[in-house]
Image (cartoon, rainbow, N blue to C red):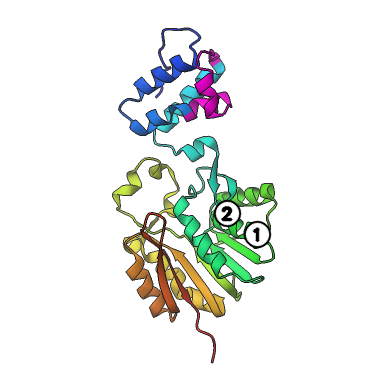
Amino acid sequence: MSAALATDHATPSVQDLLTTARQHCAANTVAAEDCGLLLALALTVPRAWLLTHGDKTVDTTARRRFETLLSRRLAGEPMAYLRGRQGFWSLELEVTPDVLVPRPETELLVELALAHMSERGRLADLGTGSGAIALALASERPDWQIMATDQSTAALAVATGNAARLGLRVEFRRGHWFAPLPGERFDIIVSNPPYIASDDACLQGDGVCQEPRTALAAADNGLADLAAIAAAAPRHLLPGGWLLLEHGAGQGPAVHEQLTGAGFADITTHADLAGRPRVTLGQQPCAN
């Protein structure tokens, strides 16, 4: 939305502005539902404040902030980017368009990793993005040595900033998957790699098209990066160590096959809260 919102008042009230904005967004249900959140963000107040202050006037500066935010939302930008933050696990993470927006279903990966983490050990998070997985695990297991890799310098800057702000200890390294970890072995390796097929229509969905494509899409019908990690992981796991991979709802059998081919044992696939197969894990056999 490039034009200013037209209202009947030079200095509209909160309720006037919300009514006009929702009418303007009538064709975009998602944006219309987010008008209250966006106005609260522009006014730097809690959303609940709007309910009891509908008669308050909105000054020109705040109104322009609101119009800019609304324009960006109508263009499909995720709310997390507009807020500049996203809740994940028990953490509030800063996010930018340089990183994937952390999603609730990824918390299953954290839960399963925690179930396999003893008092102390070493863990690697591959393709860390905002640092969501690594930082959630560091918050629960402060005695673990946790390393996180990403090939994006911009993403690592976001992750490093989150770690510093939250006071959590994670070592970040730049590079593709295992490249920054030569010769190193871990008790657990976790990853939420790109797993959407490059031609999947969902890449054009609301918000998704604004996220880094390299963090979403992979070749071979979305399986290429999962296969690469599964094949290389045995060289970086200690005997009895675990590999945990998040994947698409329909990819469980293919990932199970990848782990089997890489020599993993005790392979299981776990469903997220919506009942969709979401994480497959396998154990590195112990040496005889």
Q: Position of residue 262 (x, y in %)?
A: 42, 79
Element assignment for label 2 = loop
Residue pictured at 30% horizontal, 53% vertical: 199
Q: Which mark is residue 131?
A: 2
For the residue pair 74 and 9, the one nearer the viewer reads as 9
Q: Quadrant of the N terminus?
A: top left
Q: Quadrant of the C terminus?
A: bottom right
Residue pictured at 36% horizontal, 58% vertical: 275
Residue pictured at 45% horizontal, 48% vertical: 212
Q: Is residue 178 visible?
A: no
Residue 39 counted in the magenta span: yes
Mark 1, other Cα within 10 Å: few <14 / some 14–19 / many ≥20: many
Q: Amino acid at mark 1?
A: Val
Q: Which residue is mark 1?
A: 170
**Residue placed furthest toward the bottom:** 288
Q: Is residue 116 visible?
A: yes
Element assignment for label 1 = loop
On screen, residue 27 above or below 273? above
Residue 1 counted in the magenta span: no
Q: Amino acid at mark 2?
A: Gly
Q: Position of residue 72 (x, y in %)?
A: 44, 31
Q: Quadrant of residue 270?
A: bottom left
Mark 2, other Cα within 10 Å: few <14 / some 14–19 / many ≥20: many
Q: Position of residue 163 (x, y in %)?
A: 65, 52
The magenta-colored residue range is 37-60
Q: Is residue 81 left or right of residue 161?
A: left
On screen, residue 98 above or below 24? below
Residue pictured at 59% horizontal, 73% vertical: 186
Count numbered badges in the picture.
2
Asked if marks 1 and 2 touch (Cβ < 8 Å), the reply is: yes
